[in-house]
Image (tube, rainbow, N blue to C red):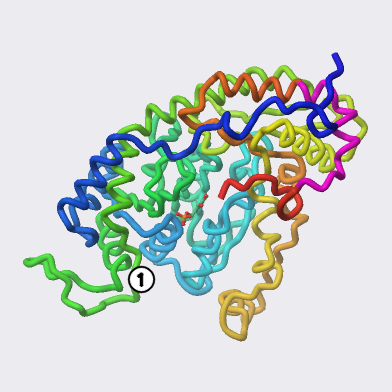
Amino acid sequence: MSEQLAIAGGTPVLQRSDYQNWPIIGEDDRRLINEVLDRGIVAGGTAPQVAALESEWTAYVGARHCLTTSSGTAALHMALAAVDVGPGDEVITSAFTFLASASCALHQNAIPVFVDIDPRTYNMDPAKLEAAINERTKAIIPVHIQGLPADMDLIMEIARKHGLYVIEDACQAHGAEYGGRKVGSIGDVGTFSLNNFKNLCGGEGGLFTTDDEMYLKKGLLLRCFGDEIDEVSHRRIYNASILGYMYRNQELPAALARAQLMHLDERNAVRIANANYLTQELGKIPGVIPPYCPPECKHVYFMYNVRFDPQAAGVDCERRRFRIAVEKALFREGMLVGQWQTMPVPAQDIFQSKLGYGRSSYPWAVNEANGIQYDYSVEAYPVVRMLCDTYTIVHGIHAPNGLDLMKRFIEAFHKVFGNLDQALAHADDEIYPGADGKLYGAG
Ligand SMILES: Cc1ncc(COP(=O)(O)O)c(C=O)c1O
């Protein structure tokens, strides 16, 4: 039955007020934050909330050691420095990720190399990994994208075969599991972000996990200026033995993260139930491709990713234009949809221009001086380009939003897909507040 879409002047299915906010702030958050205020200790590398978060996170993830950090980006950089990645080394990561999975290599004077993704999981494609390895490769950073674990068995096997370190970028995947093991406990080092959007939120912050005592000790030095600690008094002696940074976290974010951790599994379960419902219902609409989760994985749906296929929808339209038309129509129906990354990471200006630091384009210049060329042509990442043409994120699947809201989403999808002629007629409407493809940012 034909209905007037909101983009064509009809009534929207949803209102912004139908959505509830993330993160959820409750009694546990207030209690632990108040503990910090009442105690009067607000920071310190071994302060009570930080220390408690570290031990609770090791127990949760199943790793021996954990260090809190000021961000996920700091944890990634610390991880590369801890395993001794250095100038001219190459670090392989996915071409569909957040910049920090690659810029952490630049921060260590190393050179990021990108691998295209699997078209079903959107994670690094292990079949393309070996071709990117050479004698300069030192580490692999698999990213558990949008909450779905990367193919860790194959990645670990390839890494061990070539003697490479594996740093897991689990910044989007708190509580996700691969073969029954929590991500962040599988590689040499695991890294997590605690920023406000994440499944585990501390406002800002990060976590560094490892089983290896050597990486823990190096991480402790790196986190605090490279300063040595006196073994008897456990105090800093203000004598830096290595180049370090200031990557400590604080008591208030650590307290918030601890309180949020008490509810992580229950809130992940809400995301999973919402996602499973959407996947089941969206799978019935020709032209809508819901996310895929391999049987060995537990996906925690930091983001819910949907793709659109004009041919399957029975429409003669170029794929990118079709996605934009559908995205705009859904947005006008009141849905919070829009893209996160809009291009492969190597397509970003920093890699195209290779303007790192210094006048000579470091760190690339380290190897280019020896005749090695780095080419970040976007043609090398056809699957990421296909994904970026065709995907959108359906926001709002987090708790406390539940199936009632998900049913409204499905209603909006049916309305738009039942009236694609109207959506396509409005594909050029100026409704984007920002860059092309950005309706509603995920951060
Ligand atoms: C995949 C990925 N890696 C790294 C980071 C960096 O984390 P943070 O923002 O805490 O530095 C993020 C977070 O935005 C991320 O999504």
Image quadrant containing the N terminus? top right
Identify the residue at image location x=66%, y=73%. 354
Secondary structure, mark 1, is loop
- The residue sitting at the bottom extreme is 359
Q: In this view, does 151 lie above or below 284?
A: below
**Residue at the spot of label 1:** 245
Viewer-proximal residue, 354 or 290?
Answer: 290
For the magenta stretch, what is the residue range?
Answer: 415-431
Viewer-proximal residue, 255 or 72?
Answer: 255
Q: Is residue 244 above or below residue 391?
A: below
| Residue 37 left/right relative to 309 | left
Q: Does the magenta stretch include residue 428?
A: yes
Q: x and y percent of residue 7 in the render?
A: 81, 34
Q: x and y percent of residue 435 in the render?
A: 73, 55
| Residue 12 left/right relative to 51 | right
Q: x and y percent of residue 6 in the render?
A: 78, 30
Identify the residue at image location x=66%, y=33%. 335
Dot 1: within a 10 Å radius of its alpha carbon, few (fewer than 14), some, or many (20 or more) residues?
some
Viewer-proximal residue, 38 or 178?
Answer: 38
Q: What residue type is labelled 1?
A: Tyr
Identify the residue at image location x=44%, y=30%. 268
In the picture, residue 264 is in which quadrant?
top left
| Residue 178 left/right relative to 90 | left
Q: x and y percent of residue 174 in the render?
A: 42, 40
